[in-house]
Image (cartoon, rainbow, N blue to C red):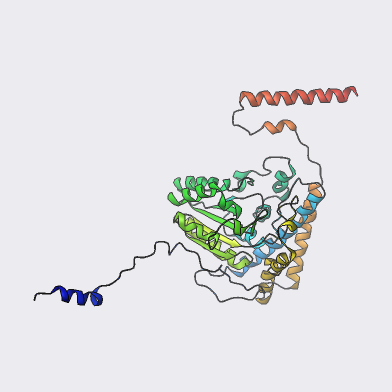
Amino acid sequence: MTTTPQAVRRASPRTRRTVTPPDPARSLLPDAEPVRLLAENGTPLPARADYPEPPAEVLRELYRRMVLGRRFDTQATALTKQGRLAVYPSSRGQEACQVGAVLAVRDTDWVFPTYRESMALVARGIDPVEVLTLLRGDWHCGYDPTEVHTAPQCTPLATQCVHAAGLAHGEAYQGRDTVALAFIGDGATSEGDFHEGINFAAVFKAPVVFFVQNNKYAISVPLSRQTAAPSLAYKGVGYGVPSEQVDGNDPVAVLAVLTRAVAHARAGKGPFLVEAHTYRMEPHTNADDATRYRDGAEVDAWRDRDPVARLETYLRARGVLDDAAVAEIAEQAEAYAADLRTRMNEQPTVDPLSLFDHVYAEPTPQLIEQREQVRAELAAAHAEEGDA
């Protein structure tokens, strides 16, 4: 049968099908709203199959370490006011992120912290005095990074992203299932090193979890001046990296989301980006006046979302915590703070010549010359003291 052009034209609207190609970014996009498993008052929200709740004993340990972490943070802030620390960036209000992140990884995984992750480091089991050594100015890093699989706290913004991507790639290349966890602030996502680190990790499928703690301010710069994206988690799409956003003051959700992100990376599927929506209750550091750029009402609103109180309420309702357990953990926290206070009040013995150690594997002629100049100055000063 011969088909006329008119018949083709008449049939076309009925027989032609518009085929919509699959959206390649669909599997990369985060949830439209941050993942939450607990309401702000500590009551459970509907369970999610994609983010199963961690076991009760893990949540109890999460609570214990959060209480210890908050007490450590308070004590470190006090030590700064007493002149025992040169500077201290508090992470009060971010306990769920700080502790939940390190509980999501193994001891053999590597953590790449920023200057604000002191609480995360003590939650990882590192001696608190060693953690604070950098902030008191005694040494470049108070702990042995290779022993605790934790890089030195990083002050330059986002440079730890490159370090994490490189180490993770190297570990995978050697056949190990190590995951690198890189802590990032919201301001660091505006830096070139963030781009280079996440892009490298995506291309080479390096097992890295990039964990952005969006505490709403890069020092005094609000998030609205950092990005026009719906959330920082959407930045992963441009690199081909799956991402998720989570309520950073919901400890159960933080641990659940990061556990899945770490499993994704460990399975050889490449990096994962997680953005936690949280809030820094204290100033950027003790040298900052936060009242210049945010008002008390905003701080009070976030105080009502306290992650420690939220988890305590939930665990009490489940029978995992009671008055005796809460009191025992609080007592542990006080003893922890007292020990830290006592040890930090001991004046350290500092050798000025140690400034030249570990700068290079083999000291350069210039470094040797500088060290000898300092040695001569110290000898001259001691001689003058002896004459006096």
Q: How many marks?
A: 0
Point out the residue furthest to the right here: 388
| Residue 63 image point, x, y percent | 67, 65
Q: Is residue 355 visible?
A: yes
Q: Nearer the viewer, residue 241 or 119?
A: 241
| Residue 229 image point, x, y percent | 53, 60
Task: Identify which residue is drawn at 54% across, 49% down.
Answer: 194
| Residue 259 image point, x, y percent | 54, 62
Task: Identify which residue is drawn at 61% across, 75% down.
Answer: 44
| Residue 147 image point, x, y percent | 61, 45
Task: Identify which residue is drawn at 78% across, 37% down.
Answer: 349
84, above or below 67, in the image:
above
309, above or below 291, in the image:
below
Point out the residue furthest to the left here: 1
What is the quadrant of the C terminus in the image?
top right
Q: Nearer the viewer, residue 248 or 64?
A: 248
341, above or below 28, in the image:
above
Q: Nearer the viewer, residue 4 or 243?
A: 4
Point out the residue furthest to the front here: 6
What is the quadrant of the N terminus in the image?
bottom left
Q: Locate residue 382 relative to residue 127 in the image: left or right.
A: right
Q: Is residue 262 visible?
A: no
